[in-house]
Amino acid sequence: MLPAPGVLTIRAVQAKAHPRTELRKALGQFATGITIVTTRAADGLPAGLTVNSFSSVSLDPPLALWCLGLSSAHYDVFRLAEQQLINVLAADQIELAQRFATRGADRFAGVAWSPTDTGLPRLDGCTAWFEGGVRSRYEEGDHLILVGRIESFEIVRGKPLVFYNSHFAELADAPPHGGHSSHR
């Protein structure tokens, strides 16, 4: 039975401690896409890392978010960055995802990319790109949540790279996309 309108019911909930590995397994049951977020470091060099915690936030205004681990080697670069580019990976870009997830790797060596009009590294072969500025940052738990305003985006044909149960996967029945579309 629902409480009467205007009556506020508050129930205390005791947080339950979960073993980290078991919680990670449970969260891994949610399939996500894979992105590589890129920017320029203060010295002008390109920087990027693999991210699967990307999500749309709002269509009006157009906003998206992603999460950065506080222990990431790129924490300071992205914490200070004012601009970012989300590269949505295609199913055939597993090696690229792994490279940008590896600590100490020379991530851009031999990788096909070009600078956008604002100078951000845009990786070739992706299914979509979202470029824009960082609107807000929130530190929660062991991550920094970055909310960005989408200033331009582009979509092309291709199957997305998927991450499920700690493994890369390909979407078997990806519906065909209507073609290339760019919005600046």
Image (tube, rainbow, N blue to C red):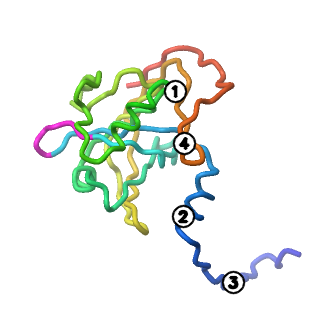
Distance from disc 2 to disc 1, alpha carbons, whole Å, reads 27 Å
Distance from disc 3 to disc 2, alpha carbons, whole Å, reads 31 Å
Residue 10 shows which numbered tag? 3
Which SS class for mark 2? helix
Residue on which the image places disc 1: 91
Q: What stretch is highlighted in magenta?
A: 42-47
Residue on which the image places disc 2: 21
Distance from disc 3 to disc 1, alpha carbons, whole Å, reads 46 Å
Name the amino acid type tagged 3: Ile
Mark 4 closeness class: few <14, some 14–19, many ≥20 residues within 10 Å: few
Nearer the N terminus, badge 1 or badge 4?
1
What residue appears at the point 51 percent right and 48 percent down from the top-left corner?
57
Mark 1 closeness class: few <14, some 14–19, many ≥20 residues within 10 Å: many
Residue on which the image places disc 4: 167
Magenta-colored segment: predominant secondary structure: loop
What residue appears at the point 58 percent right and 64 percent down from the top-left corner?
23
Name the amino acid type tagged 4: His
Distance from disc 2 to disc 4, alpha carbons, whole Å, reads 15 Å
What residue appears at the point 24 percent right and 31 percent down from the top-left corner?
108
Which SS class for mark 1? loop
Mark 3 closeness class: few <14, some 14–19, many ≥20 residues within 10 Å: few
Q: In this view, does 40 lie to the left or right of 100?
A: left
Which SS class for mark 4? strand
Nearer the N terminus, badge 3 or badge 1?
3
Quadrant that contains the C terminus: top left
State the image coordinates of residue 121 (x, y, percent, origin top left): 27, 31
Q: Do the residues labelled 3 and 1 touch (CB within 8 Å)?
A: no
